[in-house]
Image (cartoon, coloured by chain):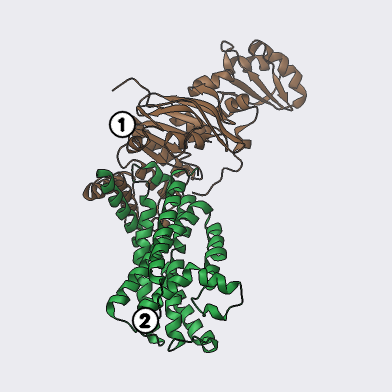
Chain colours: A green, B brown
């Protein structure tokens, strides 16, 4: 299977390209680290006192899984911007004119995002521990939770690949990201319990896959009741990855410029 | 080596919605030659290049490049072509060396081959000192050189250059032209699109003029110029009232059926090839007592050819051509 070997090699080359760019784009690193930290401080100290979270020791415990899920899912956003930018600058044309694997431009991004998400996760957990969050399960479950979160980030990298390829400009990517995906993360159980929301919104929040993922993380990090959240989360992650990767690749192949 | 042309396209058509970018384009470039595709913005040049470089599927028509079909053998073809597009497609956050090594890896050279080739190309393109700097610090001309170098990583037998010098200053254009000429002298077949007549004139063996998605003329630079007629005599009079006298004096020098054009104090005459040129013109004007401030003979330029072929000057069509590199 030499074509599989080249796909892996090309993915590695493109992932390395992204990772090399990180230290040269300080604004990107700030987006990845400082911004989520600001969110933690905002919710923990500004809103946190007014939010009741029955069943949790404190708001920091309730909040951290939510904010981590939001940050990880939304972290792939820079992928959409970068792909739009690559298209505008002609780099995607260059890649498409090379004898390289078709999917590598996208899979390279997704794997590079994995590294960025791991960094982001480490920063968020560290800040969470400082503001009063504490793990209440065993190491195995915590690690499982981390794997689940990285899987979520991987899945959303493909969603943002698709947005970047479809948008055609960084501005449009920005608009799609902030008007569709960002609100979705708020209409969930990430920051407040859905039971406090009005009818309609509550049902939406309960059905929102972000709520499922946040609840699964709360289970794995804090021992909160799980129901079927972990397995359903895995299904969501696999489903989103497969569908978004398929659509992205199809879009990439048929780009007309 | 087969005698098949390096680039051969027949009846290429491509529409984007209601826009007919190509309406049946034929192009041929024999191996080792330079084909210039000349036309204004929106003529269909880039669409043709995108089809020939496998980036875009034609709606109809066939094309073979380096002996391979651009749709059926696309993946194999990609390892035999180099493309330098309009926008200097380099990663601004990578250094020049990293950019070239990355492209080498994506052409499936080994890591060490890629690095060696990157260093060779940096030396060749006068970028050794800049090789360790990120490309965002490069000037427009340096970026184009890096872009062209990236297209040459595997020494492809066929090279596509889509408006390689648009937006460059004259010195950088000249440098890039010399680089392209070196490639050609080594046997590379080049398809070059341009809106600049002087560029096609200088680099191309044959020129295809495209307008509104169709090839409206094809031939050597001289063929195209010949379609506009021979040399023109341009005369500037000291006294505009002598224009009629000058017209009468120069009439016998004009080509059969052609007229002497008068515009104020300036006259323009399509010269008969056996008319005797400037000497004959000056003698006749002198005999007629017409005082002139300037007499020149001008060979027709591609500008003249473009005007004749499309009914409008090339300059009008390139007004919005000042794209930053």
Residue A52 visible? The answer is yes
The one of B291 and B170 positioned closer to us in this rendering:
B170
Q: How far, Cα to Cα, is label 2 from label 1?
A: 71 Å
Q: Compared to B258, does A96 lie above or below?
A: below
Residue A26 found in image quarter: bottom left
Q: Secondary structure at mark 1?
A: loop
- Compared across the picture, whether B32 is left or right of B305 comes to left
Residue that mark 1 sits on = B186
Q: Residue sitting at 53 percent across and 72 percent down? A: A205
Q: Secondary structure at mark 2?
A: loop
Mark 2 Cα-neighbour bin, 10 Å: few <14, some 14–19, many ≥20: some
Q: Position of residue B161 (x, y in %)?
A: 43, 37
Question: Could you tell me which chain the residue with mark 1 belongs to?
Answer: B
* Tag of residue A223: 2
Q: Position of residue A28 (x, y in %)?
A: 43, 67
The one of A108 and B65 positioned closer to us in this rendering:
A108
Q: Position of residue B55 (x, y in %)?
A: 44, 40
The one of A19 and B117 positioned closer to us in this rendering:
A19
């Amino acid at each position: 299977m030499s074509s599989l070997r080249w796909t892996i090699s090309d993915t590695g080359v493109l992932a390395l390209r992204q990772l090399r760019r990180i230290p040269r784009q300080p604004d990107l690193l700030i987006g990845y680290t400082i911004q989520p930290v600001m969110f933690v401080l905002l919710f923990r100290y500004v809103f946190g006192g007014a939010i009741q979270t029955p069943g949790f020791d404190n708001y920091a415990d309730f909040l951290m899984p939510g904010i981590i899920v939001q940050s990880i899912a939304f972290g792939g956003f820079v992928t959409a911007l970068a792909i739009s930018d690559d298209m505008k600058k002609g780099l995607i044309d260059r890649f498409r004119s090379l004898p390289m694997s078709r999917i590598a431009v996208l899979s390279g991004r997704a794997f590079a995002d994995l590294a960025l998400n791991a960094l982001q996760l480490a920063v968020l957990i560290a800040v969470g521990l400082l503001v009063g969050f504490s793990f209440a399960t065993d190491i195995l479950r915590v690690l499982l939770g981390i794997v689940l979160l990285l899987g979520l980030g991987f899945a959303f990298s493909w969603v943002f690949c698709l947005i970047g390829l479809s948008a055609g400009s960084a501005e449009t990517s920005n608009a799609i990201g902030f008007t569709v995906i960002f609100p979705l993360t708020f209409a969930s159980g990430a920051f407040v319990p859905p039971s406090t929301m009005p009818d309609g919104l509550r049902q939406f929040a309960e059905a929102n896959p972000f709520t499922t993922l946040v609840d699964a993380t709360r289970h794995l990090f804090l021992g909160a009741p799980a129901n079927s959240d972990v397995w359903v989360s895995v299904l969501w992650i696999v489903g989103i990855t497969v569908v978004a990767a398929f659509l992205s690749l199809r879009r990439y192949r048929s780009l007309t410029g | 080596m087969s005698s098949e042309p390096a680039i051969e396209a027949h009846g290429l058509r491509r529409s984007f919605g209601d826009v007919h970018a190509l309406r049946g384009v034929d192009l041929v470039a024999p191996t080792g030659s330079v084909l210039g595709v000349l036309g204004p913005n929106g003529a269909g040049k880039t669409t043709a290049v995108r089809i020939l470089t496998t980036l875009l599927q034609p709606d109809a028509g066939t094309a073979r490049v380096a002996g391979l079909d651009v749709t059926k053998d696309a993946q194999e073809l990609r390892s035999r072509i180099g493309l330098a597009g309009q926008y200097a497609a380099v990663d601004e956050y990578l250094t020049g060396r990293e950019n070239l090594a990355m492209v080498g890896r994506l052409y499936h050279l080994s890591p060490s081959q890629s690095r060696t080739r990157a260093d060779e190309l940096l030396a060749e393109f006068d970028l050794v000192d800049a090789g360790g700097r990120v490309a965002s610090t490069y000037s427009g001309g340096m970026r184009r050189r890096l872009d062209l170098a990236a297209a040459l990583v595997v020494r492809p037998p066929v090279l596509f250059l889509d408006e390689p010098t648009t937006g460059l200053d004259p010195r950088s254009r000249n440098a890039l032209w010399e680089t392209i000429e070196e490639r050609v002298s080594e046997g590379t077949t080049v398809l070059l699109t341009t809106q600049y007549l002087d560029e096609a004139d200088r680099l191309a063996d044959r020129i295809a003029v495209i307008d509104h998605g169709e090839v409206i003329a094809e031939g050597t630079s001289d063929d195209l110029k010949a379609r506009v007629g021979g040399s023109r005599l341009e005369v500037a009079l000291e006294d505009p009232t002598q224009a009629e006298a000058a017209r009468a004096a120069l009439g016998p020098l004009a080509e059969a059926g052609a007229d002497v054009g008068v515009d104020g104090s300036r006259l323009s005459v399509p010269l008969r090839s056996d008319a005797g040129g400037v000497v004959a013109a000056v003698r006749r004007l002198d005999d007629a007592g017409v005082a002139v401030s300037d007499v020149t003979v001008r060979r027709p330029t591609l500008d003249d050819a473009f005007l004749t072929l499309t009914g409008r000057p090339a300059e009008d069509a390139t007004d919005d051509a000042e794209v930053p590199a």
